[in-house]
Amino acid sequence: MEELEVTSWLMLDAIKKSKSAEIVETVGNLQTGHSKSVFCIIEEDYLELCYSDAAANTIRRFEDRDEFDEALEERKEDHGEALFENNGDKDLDEDEDEEEGEDLEDGFSVEDESEVY
């Protein structure tokens, strides 16, 4: 892996928005955290564009796809995003104790109750 320090987010944005850049995944969020990594492939180069508001911005270049994928998984673990991966089509709002045929409105059970105040 090679690493190059970059002083401006504009440089990282220019690389990210180039026509030849294939964005693989973005990990992190500068609005909720202190860093964001954009993993992209440009021709035969595997890159990680590291945006940071707490440390130096960097461009990391990986030797091959395996090293690139390993760094992506490591970054997901660092940001806690690996926990949410591979959920498939699981319905996260699924309620085990819902009865079949029960009317639901906005995630709440609709029941006939008289309003007593």
Image (tube, rainbow, N blue to C red):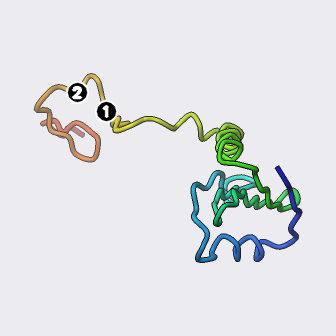
Give the position of the C terminus as an image quadrant.
top left
Q: Is residue 29 above or below residue 43?
A: above
In 3D space, how far apart are the residues under numbered discs 1 and 2 (Cα atoms)? 8 Å
Counting from the top left corner in percent of width and height, residue 81 is at 60, 41
Counting from the top left corner in percent of width and height, residue 99 is at 17, 25
Name the element at disc 1: loop
Q: In the rendered image, which quarter is residue 8 located in?
A: bottom right
Q: Amino acid at mark 1?
A: Glu
Look at 76% across and 58% down and name the residue there: 50
User: Is 113 or 82 nearer to us in this picture?
Assistant: 82
Look at 34% across and 38% down and name the residue there: 89
Residue 98, disc: 2
Counting from the top left corner in percent of width and height, residue 41 is at 63, 61
Q: In the rendered image, which quarter is residue 114 located in?
A: top left
- Mark 1 and mark 2 residues within 8 Å of each other at the beta carbon: yes
Q: Is residue 96 left or right of residue 26?
A: left
Look at 31% across and 32% down and name the residue there: 94
User: Is 46 or 51 nearer to us in this picture?
Assistant: 46
